[in-house]
Image (cartoon, rainbow, N blue to C red):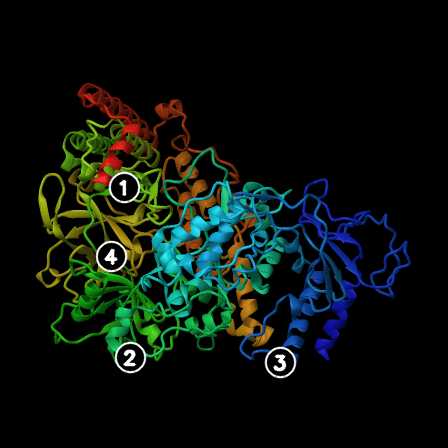
Amino acid sequence: MEARKKRIEALAVIDRIPVHSSTSSSNPYKTQQSVDKIRLNEDHQRSFHLEISIPDDGDRDYAYSHESPLPRSFDEDMSPSSSLIDAMEELFIDYSQTETRNTTANPKYGQLTRSSVMRNCEIRDHRPVEEDHKTSEGIMPTEPFVFTWRTPLLYYSAVVYTYTNHEPAKCPSGMKNAPMIAKWEVCRIAYHCSLSPEDVPLKYLSQWKDQDVFWKDLKQHNCFRDKAFPAKCNREVWDQGHGQNPNEERAVEYKANLRFCNPDRKPKLELEIPVLGKSSRLRRKFGSNRFIELQLLFDDGCATILKNKDERRALARWLVQEHHPFLSQTWVACYIEEIRSKKGKSSSVAPKITGKRVVLFGEHVVGLNIGSTMSARASQINHPSALTSVDSFCDRYDVLDWLLQLDSNADQPYIKLFHRISLGSITMPFIMFAGLSKTTPTVMLMENSIRHIHTDIESPNGTPMNDGIGRISHLLLSEVRDIMGLDFLPTAIQARIGGAKGLWMMDSTPYPPDERWIEIYPSQRKWECNWSDPAHRILEVVSVSSYRGPAFLNLQFIPILEERAIDRKLMRTTLCERIDKHIRNDLGNAKAAMEIPEAFRKWIHETSSPTFVDSQDSTSWFVGGLPADWPKTMSFLADGGFEPRRLEFLNSLMFSHQKKRWEQMETKLHIRIAKSTSALMAIDFQRVLAPNEVQLCFSPAFDDGQQTLDDLGGFDVLVGRCPAHLPSDIQKVKAVFKPELRHFKNVIVFSSLGDEPLANKLSGGDYDGDKAWVCWDPDIVDNFKSTDVPSPHTFKEYFQPNTQTLGSLASRYGKPHYLDMFLEEAFDFHLSPSYMGTCTGYKESLAYHEGSIGNETVVKLSMLLSALVDQEKSGFEFDENIWCRIKEEQCGGKLFLKAPAYKTDDFTALATSNHIIDYLKLAIHQRIHDGIREFSNYRTDSGIGYDKPTLSAIGTILRTKQIR
């Protein structure tokens, strides 16, 4: 009776909605006089047309038969009240539960797709305002549809069609059963040539397994004749896509972009060049070709889509509830995350892009070649049975339930469980989906080789001292080394196995040499896992401990060093001296590289960091007769006998690169400290280190410019971790050497004694793979004094964590539909704009103007940033209104702050500022300017060889070498 009463009340509220309405992001229910065509409003806001299918007298519109007629001139605003939203939600839930009771579909998974959600709707195409527009970069989705509704549902479930409903990328009919790589490349080439793929009469040929034959045939095809083609994908990518060179560690990655560039235009779809990347658990289990990464890219003008709750929810619903036809396949969304900007790629003149990455899964298999890609080497160890799923149909329920065992983890908060899918970050920059994280599969363990430890190592007050870290046997670690082809035995590995993740360090206690085992502590266990499945018992390695040279001083550490300096003026002087030393050494290395061929090759290797090197998989290896990126070009020419002092082209290339490196050094304020490094943080399981003692041993020995060190025993050292905002995020500790820990190389071992783990003092770190910055420069260390971690400050009056469990969603929406709602809720949450960058910038500006990072308000904001770091796990909402309240109530009403001088190119302001970063920014600018001039003069004075071969001459020389 209660449910029936609620339905009657809900219908009574909804019945009051006007019939003809044009809904926009600003006023969802404002009517308009003419609805003959769907067009952009005068204010360029998106709109759609709801039309109830009831008899019409030709002049008037009726909401329902009992409703009073409304004239077309009706112009009363009707904003959605809370009761209206509640009523709609009540009807939607009731509708879903009715579907649940009546469904005869798969009992595991009932799809809430267009066929069910819009069961009583008619959809008819609407002629677009402008002709369909295609570019060489992609296709434009079609204009919105007109909906004729017979059933009142949530109004915003249709909003998404006004800006995201697009024409699917269709393959030529003869390519339907072709391998995924061939279909993808045909469509990518067609879009580049401004052609519609479905209009190209092509039929897949078996000889196209040869990439050269494929490209030759397409270039000779009538539709592509005399067209400019995009770059080829790497041959290894093409061969792997055809299953000719199966590789369990690397898989073909397919990425597409949906760009929202202008609110007045339709979004544009672009296909990226396929590349090879590390494989992942789900790709190995279900087939790598069943996954596509779709990047939603919003320019500033379209980012409001994500700020409007209704439009954001509609976008989430469209992504999750719809089946997306693409390349003759059916795809569904199963994961979403923020696209974090890549270091070194930002530009002050480039438009700001807000990005979300969506992972699509192919449920129906046609031409996907999803044969086993599970690690052959892992299989050989224990001879598992079926490790891969090759069913022609596999829905996302099967995928996520296999990974997360949903029924066994129903008591977990659903947002936190979704975050367990995204366990960290190693691509995208790195996707860290437990199933999608890029890992190297190694050893498959027997169940009795996995030791489940019931309690963590705890301090006297009950604090876990080994948060995220466990131990692994020497034998198992040796097998991992052999499988990965390493020439050294790592002390520790960052890895995943089943529902656990973290760091595992080598056990040094005497065990039989033939024993293979791994320990899993409660702090490493993220969800309950089905350990009987052999695929969950494969040890998947993310990274290994290794030797790392001198480290750069992170920009966030500089204010802390000054804040806690005993003599601030001396600290500035010391850092300026380190800048001078760094640039002098860099210039000396560049000069030596120009003179000595062996030094030139070494210089190429040492300066080819990821910041300056294009990915080897991003483009073809050769472009225009030379390798695609500068390190390979220089190495290629050096191997051919060319020298930068004799070849003008190589000389110019070297100078240009050195100049770019220094310019980025100035932008990022990268100061290399010779007596510093970074290392994975581990703990002392043998409990021989006292509180505030650490041990760091090197292999090979560390050359800090003055001496060669095997360990840091006897030094006072600073340890820090990024992000670093609080004065306590750098701690001064004592480095010692304990013979019991001598086996642990290239990891910094912290004590397991005391009341609080040292990692936790460093901006709330743990031991699941975090790295510490370690500095033993006496001029810096001796001038530093540690401080205690400030008392925590909560923001519970502004936001609360979302503790709703997965089980509660199942109870509310019914078993067949709860996974859809789980994903829709998670997508809606993750589509929200991130305020981490905004709050960080404001906190830095406030600290800049206050002249201290220890200011009470600045400390509170630093703790807010710590809370925002965990937002994806906590699930609390944080929007512009909350942020404005915090600035008004916690920051003295300072809503807007001027940007610090070091974030601008105003060198006049830098020269008059007393802030340490401004001071160092000006110093490094002057020294780099002098360095560039000196290097340029050196090139001129040294001269280039008598023949001065030009770039055009290189081709002749190379062809001569090839003939020989």
Name the mark nearer the viewer: 1 or 3. Answer: 1
Q: Percent from the top left, x then y, of residue 902? A: 38, 32
Q: Amino acid at mark 4?
A: Met
Residue nearest the viewer, comparing 879 with 23:
23
Identify the residue at image location x=26%, y=36%.
959
Which structural element holds mark 2? helix
* Mark 2 and mark 4 residues within 8 Å of each other at the beta carbon: no
Q: Which residue is mark 4?
A: 681
Q: Which residue is mark 2?
A: 447
Q: Amino acid at mark 1?
A: Lys
Residue nearest the viewer, comparing 209 with 46:
209
Q: CA distance from mark 2 to mark 3?
A: 38 Å
Quarter residue 375 falls in: bottom left
Q: Percent from the top left, x then y, of residue 280? A: 36, 63
Q: Earlier in the sequence, mark 3 or mark 4?
A: 3
Q: Which residue is mark 1?
A: 632
The label number, if any, that marks residue 731 in the structure image:
none
Q: Earlier in the sequence, mark 1 or mark 3?
A: 3
Q: Quadrant of the C terminus?
A: top left
Q: Earlier in the sequence, mark 2 or mark 1?
A: 2
Q: CA distance from mark 1 to mark 3?
A: 59 Å
